[in-house]
Structure formats: C-alpha cells, structure tokens
Image: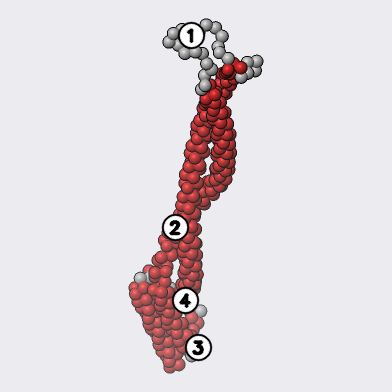
Amino acid sequence: TRQEEISAVSEALSFLTSDDAHDLFTRTFNFVQTSQSVETGARRHAAQVLAAVGHRLSSPELVALSSKVRLDAFTKVKKAIDDMIGKLLQDKEDEIKQKDFCIEELNTNERETELKNRDKEETQAKIDTLTNEIETLTNEIDTLKAEIASMQTELKRAGEDREKENKDFQDTVADQRATVKLLEKTLDVLKGFYNKKHKGASLVQEDPAGPPPPPGFKSYKKNSGSGGVMGMIQQIINDAKTEEAEAIQAEKDAQAAYESFVKDTNDSITAKQDSITDKSDTKAKKEGELTDSKKDLENIMIELEELANENSDLHKACDFTLKNFDVRQQARDEEVEGLREAKAALSGAQLTLLQRSGA
C-alpha cells in the first residue's frame, strides 16, 4: 500500500506540474488579484465619496458609513445606503409637511390674533361709550332730582305764602265788614234822628220850646251839615264794600294763580319723575351691557394671551425649520446624491466582478 500511495501522489503531481495546470493556475491567481484590486478601488472610491459628503454636510452618519464601506460586505453596505437614502427622503417629506404645517398654523394664528385685536378694540370702544352714556344718564338723573326737590320747595313756599295771603284776606274782609256794619248802624242812628216823621217840617218853623238861651249863646237849630256827614259815612261804607269786593276778587285771582302754579308744578314734577324712571331703566340696561362687555373683554384678553402663547410655541417649533428649510433641503439632496454615487460605485465594482467571474 505504501507503494500505491507513492504512485498516486506522483500521478497527482504530474497533473499539477503539467502545462495546462500551469496556465490554469496563472489565470486563476490573476483573477483573484484583479478582483481584489477592483473591490479595493470601489471601496476606496465609495468611502471617499461618503467621507467627503459627510464632512461637507457635517453628517456623522455618512462619515461613519464611509468607514463601514472599507470593512463590510457590499450587500450589507448597499443596504445601509438604501436605508439612509430612504430615511433622508422620508425626512425631506416630513420637513416639507412640517413647513406647510408651520406656515398654515402661523398664518391662522396671525389672522385669529388680528380678528381678536379688532374685537378688543371694538369692545373697548363699546365700554368707553357705555361708560360715558352711564355717566351722562347719572348726571341727568341727579339734575332732575335736584329740580324736583327745588320745585317741591317752591310748592311748599307757595303754599305758605298762599296761606298767609288768605289769612290777610280774611282779616281784611272781616275788618271791612265790621267797619261797614258799624258805619251802617251809625248812619241808621243819624237817619233816625234827622228824619223823624212825627215832627216833619214844623220843627223847622217853630221856635224851640223852653227858656231862652243864656246870654252869649245862639238859639238851638238843626245842624245844616248833617246831610254832609251822613253822605260821608255812606261814602265810607261804599268804599269799604268796594274794597271788600276787590279783596275778594284779588283772593279769587290769587287762589286761581296758586292752583294753576301747583298744577303746572306737579305736572312738571310728574314729567321729571317719569323721565327719571325712563333714564334709570336705560341706565340699568346700559350697566348690564357694560358688565357683559367687560366680561367679553376679559375673555378676549384671555384668548389673545392663548394666541400669543401659541404663536410663541409655533415659532419655537418652526423658526429653525422655516429659516433653514432651503439649506436643509439642499443639504439633504446632496447627501442623497452622495449616497447614490457611493452605491453606484459599489454596484459597478460588483458588476465587474460578476462579469469577470462569469468569464
């Protein structure tokens, strides 16, 4: 068997040392060396592309991937590139949606804030108007109350004056009537004396009875001026009656004027009281409106504060996106392009190896 083993080894060596085997081995080793060279060049190129893009865009992911290209298998690296491209494209789409959302929300917030500020101005103007109207109504009501109090005072004074005038009238009439009564009695006495029927005209012609008057005295005769005295008394009586009639008429006129004054004053007081009632109702209504308007203004201020907070939150969330949107989109596109270029380099190298392997 030892001889058989030596014989088999010799035969195998003859195959390996033949010209055909030499040519075959040469081609095989050349392929391996070429494949290794192609793969190394592709890896180097892909790594350089990824590293350059990563440094330019300050992307640690691309820099890290450039290191993987040098070590990992093509398939694993290409999958990592595809995953990164997919993530970058998704991030790009999400950022576009975020930008659209931010613009829409900021515009909506701006419109709502503008409308609320307009509501605030209108409500504040309404509050100012209501405040002025209430103040005016309050002053008007106070003025009416003061006027009513003044009228009531005037009524009281007019009543007191009327009472005093009426007392003076009563005293005057009583005095006039007493005077007339006294004078009429006096006149009746005189008439009775001077107009006695039983004596007639004889008393005028006969000498007076009795002894003659003492020396130095004239004889007794009727007073020839008696008619003048009675006429004067009658005139006084007539004057007194005229004064009484005038006093009565004056009292009637004064009473009528007083009653007219009282009626007109009471009518004016009633009208002013009605006006106070109407103005008080209007004032109460406006005070209710003022209370509601102040509550509305408080709610508007709360809503404006909420809108301001929302605006602040939106700017915190959106300012960076909106300010850097174009730059970030361009950088992301360049990152995707770099990844695709690296993948293309790897794919080209892999295809070359396959082709050579098939050959």
Does residue 353 lie above or below 185 as drawn? below
Residue contact between numbered discs 4 and 2, judged by CB atoms under 8 Å: no
For label 4, the residue is 78
Mark with earlier residue (3, 1): 1
Image check: 236 left or right of 329? right
Give x and y (percent) for residue 79: 48, 74
Of badges 3 and 1, nearer the viewer stands 1
| Quadrant in the picture for residue 274 | top right
Q: Which of the pair 15/289 is nearer the observer? A: 289
Q: Which residue occupies 49% across, 67% down?
A: 104
Q: Which residue is mark 2?
A: 308
Residue with the mark numbered 1 = 213
Asked if one can make out residue 344 in the rendered structure from this viewpoint, the answer is: yes
Among the two numbered marks 2 and 3 on one chain, the one whose residue lies closer to the N terminus: 2
The amino acid type, in three-letter code, at marker 4 is: Lys
Residue 172: percent from left, percent from top: 53, 25
Tell me which numbered mark, 4 or 2, is placed earlier along the sequence: 4
Frontmost of labels 4 and 1 is 1
Which amino acid is tagged 1?
Answer: Pro
Marks 3 and 1, Cα distance to the nearest angstrom? Answer: 205 Å
